[in-house]
């Protein structure tokens, strides 16, 4: 069991380490300079609220089932949500980016 927990923590750390910098860069690239703080603030709020809410939601589930049952149940729910939202992530044609002229010319 400890090896399984270590593997899960390593996978979580790898996923978080790859996702967070990419999300930050993506959000700052699609937002205008004047409104850049809003999507980044929303991202951080969602992450922190999710961490807080997970404690409130997972503990009653772990009490009703055992800890392993709670993990399996939440894993199935997350996998189902992934399959439902997957069609929305299909790549769309990329728009071309025009470079702005430098004001220092």
Image: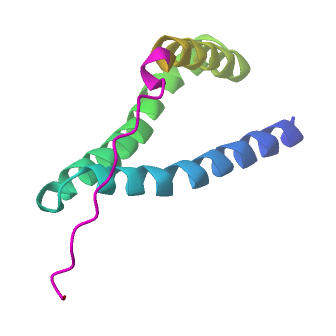
Q: Is residue 78 above or below residue 42?
A: above
Image side of residue 65 versus residue 31, left or right:
right
| Residue nearest the viewer, comparing 15 with 73 | 15
Q: Quadrant of residue 2?
A: top right
Quadrant, the C terminus: bottom left
Total marks in image: 0
Q: Is residue 63 above or below residue 18?
A: above
Residue 92: in magenta span: yes
Quadrant, the N terminus: top right
Residue 84 in the image: x percent, y percent? Answer: 48, 11
Residue 100: in magenta span: yes
Residue at image point 65% right, 44% down:
12
Residue located farthest toward the bottom when viewing the structure as drawn: 104
Residue 62 in the image: x percent, y percent? Answer: 60, 20
Q: Which residues are magenta?
A: 87-104
| Residue nearest the viewer, comparing 52 with 85 | 85
Residue 89 in the image: x percent, y percent? Answer: 46, 25
Image side of residue 40 versus residue 7, left or right:
left
Residue at image point 64% right, 12% down:
65
Residue at image point 40% right, 36% down:
50
Magenta stretch, overall SS: loop
């Amino acid at each position: 069991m400890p090896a399984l927990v270590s593997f899960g923590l390593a996978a979580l750390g790898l996923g978080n380490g790859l996702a967070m910098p990419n999300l930050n860069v993506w959000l700052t690239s699609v937002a205008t300079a004047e409104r850049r703080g809003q999507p980044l603030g929303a991202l951080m709020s969602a992450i922190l609220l999710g961490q807080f809410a997970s404690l409130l939601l997972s503990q009653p589930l772990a009490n009703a089932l055992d800890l392993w049952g709670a993990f399996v149940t939440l894993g199935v729910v997350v996998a189902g949500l992934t399959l439902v939202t997957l069609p929305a992530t299909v790549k769309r044609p990329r728009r071309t980016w025009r470079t702005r002229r430098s004001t220092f010319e």
